[in-house]
Image (cartoon, grey):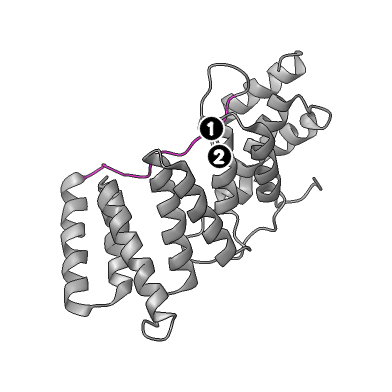
Amino acid sequence: IPESDYLGGSPDDYTQGPHIFTASDGATHKDPERDSKIHRLLFKAFTESGDPRDWFFYAEQTRICGKYDEAVIHFTSFLEMAKEGRGKRYPSITPSMVYYALLTLGRLFIHKGQVAEGRVKFIEAYSLMPSRVEALGEMALVHASRGEWAMARIYALACANSPRPRAVDFLEPEWAQWRGLDILTVALQNLGQVDNLPKYYQLLLGRKALPASERTRVETNFNNLMNGGK
C-alpha cells in the first residue's frame, strides 16, 4: 500500500487474536422523547408534501429511534420511489441519498442476521457510487466479523487504498481516515502476513483521526505483534 493520506479501517472485539472495532447499530436513544417528536413531524411533513426526500428523512429517523424493522420497510419504499422517479419525477432525490439508503439497509440486514441480503445492498451501493468507500469497508467488516480474513483483507485493502472521497452528503470520513486501515492490519495479522505490518500500524497510529477510545486497542495489537504474538 503506498503511503498516502488515503488509508483508513474497522471491525468487532474478539477474545483471541488482534482486536478490531465495530460501529454500533446507530440508534442514538439519547433523548427518546425528542426523537419520537421528530419522527412524528417528519411523517407529517411527508403526508403534506408527498416528497420522497421527506420520506427518506422519516426512514432515517425511524432507524435513529431503534425501530429497525420499520426502518427496513421505509428505506425500501424510498428506494422504490427513487427507482420509479429516476431523478425526473422526484428531482429532490440525489445519488447520495440513494447510496445512503442502500448502505443503511445493508447495515440493518446485517444487524438482523440477514448477511446475504446485507451484502447485496453493500454491493448495490458500491456499484452506484464506486468513488465512495463506506460499502467496501462494510463488506470488509462483515467478513472480519465472521473470521473470513482473506476476504476481509481484499475489501479492507480496497477501502484503505481508495482516494479520499470528495465532500458529499452523508459522508463517513472515518472509513478513509482510519477504519479501512484498521481492518486491514487485523486481517493481515490473523492471516500471518506480517512482513509489512509494523509500517501499517505506524501509519494507523499516526492518524490524528484515530479515536482515543480505539488507540489503546490498536497499540495493544501492535505490541502483541512486536512481541511475537499473532
- Which residue is pictured at 29% across the width and 54% down the height? 71
- Which residue is pictured at 41% across the width and 42% down the height? 114
From the image, which quarter does the N terminus lie in? Answer: top right
Query: Which residue is situated farthest in the right direction here?
Result: 195
The local secondary structure at tag 2 comes to helix
From the viewer's perspective, is residue 104 above or below residue 229? below
For the image, the number of numbered tags is 2
**Residue density around tag 2, few if under 14, some if 14–19, many if 20 or more, within 10 Å:** many
CA separation, marks 2 and 1?
A: 6 Å
**Residue density around tag 1, few if under 14, some if 14–19, many if 20 or more, within 10 Å:** some
From the viewer's perspective, is residue 157 above or below residue 201? below
The residue singled out by tag 2 in the image is 141
Q: Looking at numbered disc 1 in the image, what kind of residue is underneath it?
A: Ser
Q: Position of residue 160 (x, y in %)?
A: 68, 47
The local secondary structure at tag 1 comes to helix
Quadrant housing residue 84: bottom left
Q: Does the magenta stretch include residue 203?
A: no
Q: Residue 130 carries which label?
A: none
Q: Does the magenta stretch include residue 24?
A: yes
- Which residue is pictured at 39% across the width and 80% down the height? 85
Q: Is residue 94 left or right of residue 39?
A: right
> Magenta residues?
19-31
**Label 2 close to label 1 by CB (< 8 Å):** yes
Q: Residue 145 carries which label?
A: 1
Q: Position of residue 204 (x, y in %)?
A: 68, 37
Q: Where is residue 94 in the image (x, y as percent from the top left)?
A: 45, 74
From the image, which quarter does the C terminus lie in? Answer: top right
Q: Position of residue 52 (x, y in %)?
A: 31, 73
From the viewer's perspective, is residue 81 above or below residue 177? below
